[in-house]
Image (cartoon, rainbow, N blue to C red):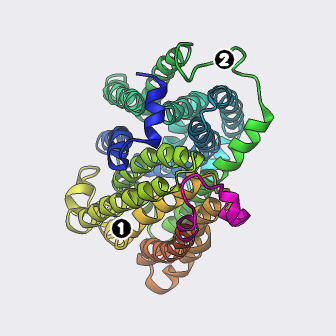
Amino acid sequence: MDSKQNTLELGTKKISSLLKDYAVPAIIAMTASSLYNMVDSIFIGNGIGSLAISGLGVCFPLMNLSTAFGTLVGVGGATILSVLLGQKNYEGANKVLGNIVSLNLVVGILFMIACTIWLDPILCFFGATENTLPYARDYMQIILYGNAITHLYMGLNSAMRSGGNPKFAMGLTIFTVIFNTVLDPIFIFTFDMGVKGAAIATVIAQTVALVIIMTVFNNRSRMLHFEKGIVRFDWRIAKESLAIGMGPFLMNSAACIVTLFLNQQMLKYLGDLGIGAFSIIHRISFLFLMIVMGLNQGMQPIAGYNYGARRYSRVKDIYKLTVKWGIGVAGVGFLASELLSMPMCRIFTSDPQLLDMAVRGIRLMNIVFPMVGFQMVSTNLFQSLGMVNKSIFLSLSRQLLFLLPAVYGLPLIFGSDGIWLSYPLSDLIASTITLVMVLTLMKKFNKLQDGDDPSILGSNIK
């Protein structure tokens, strides 16, 4: 369904109902995507071996960097869409949609070319050894060939969600995940393609999904649709989109940098299997983080629309509700990490050495996990409102300012445990700073009546 009524409800419908309408589909989609990644790793870990999991772990920094460039375009465009729809500027929203297409194509293709040319040196730089490089290379070559497809599919799916169609976005993601999961064992085992098979399954599934969503956006009866000449750049829109997307871009880029140094520390203290252990922990933790990200995706169009419509009380309400749920989900992740670590990790491997590393790692890494939920939702609030500088700072603080020094400092005191403990330490510090900034923003909002021009408080509101 596509109508202006869907969008107008963002400013009138009950906040709790809106969050359910927008977040539940996103949560289902994000959880399904995370489960696919887990199934992917389970197939590879049990069917190919422990070093194959470590090879996938080596790919994490490069995949984070690819995601960073995708979010640079997609998140910024989706945020602008929400604000423009709140202002009832439908012509401008369609121009933004076209820019999402053109920018994703350019960025995706350029990234693919650069990384493909220097793939082996990049993977070695990220921690690949002679044992894990073949697995990492086989996987990333295929993923990079489909990079532009991935960027474009994710960007348009975010636009669909921001345009008032979260259920369609959810359905398309679930379709992609199911199709991907069905193809996985066929390519990995039946065709005996190993990790290459997993990558091929991913690219095929996303290609089919991209065809579907582009067909939908080609329908000119929709409020959001492709205009003639959609690949034409509008540099004004591009500049604003890239500025807003800079926060998540830097966050994912920082994750790439941190994982690079983390892999080096893992090799130093735990060897190749240490990277495999982190790969397992990442898959499990990411299941809970993806649920929080789903909540964020549900909050984003609601907060952005109401901020554009100057309904500040609703912005505060949606943030408070989302942050409660974010902390709750992360709290469940904490309990699972402490009480169910062994059975969860055993799903991925039967190697006793790798299993012991993963179990100890997840118990130490996630001891303050509920704070991660708070920090993620709060950072997304600033991003949703177009407050670029604040979102960038919060995105970088946890990883570069706090996590990176801890990854090198704590192992000098605690040995290999120090690598795992660097995460809760950085989460604690970053969450404290985030709390101060959120309280400051809420104090400013409390001075505004719905309908007030935010400039009356000065430029600091941004």
Residue 231 x, y percent position in the rendering: 71, 22
Q: In which quarter of the image is the N terminus?
A: top left
Q: Is residue 317 above or below residue 300?
A: below
Residue 67 showing in the rendered view? yes
Q: Which amino acid does label 2 sit on?
A: Glu
Front-lying residue, 327 or 436: 436
Q: Is residue 190 above or below residue 329?
A: above
The answer to whether residue 325 is left or right of residue 459 is left
Nearest-to-viewer mark from 2 and 1:
2
For marks 2 and 1, give the CA distance: 44 Å
Question: Which residue corresponds to the image point at 62% horizontal and 19% vertical from the top-left?
Answer: 226
Residue 130 showing in the rendered view? no
Residue 455 highlighted magenta (yes or no): yes
Q: How crowded is mark 1: few (under 14 residues within 10 Å), some or many (20 or more)?
A: many
Q: What residue type is labelled 1?
A: Pro
Residue 450 x, y percent position in the rendering: 54, 54
- What residue is disc 1 on? 370
Q: What element carries label 1?
A: helix
User: In the image, which disc is placed on residue 227?
Assistant: 2
Front-lying residue, 332 or 220: 220
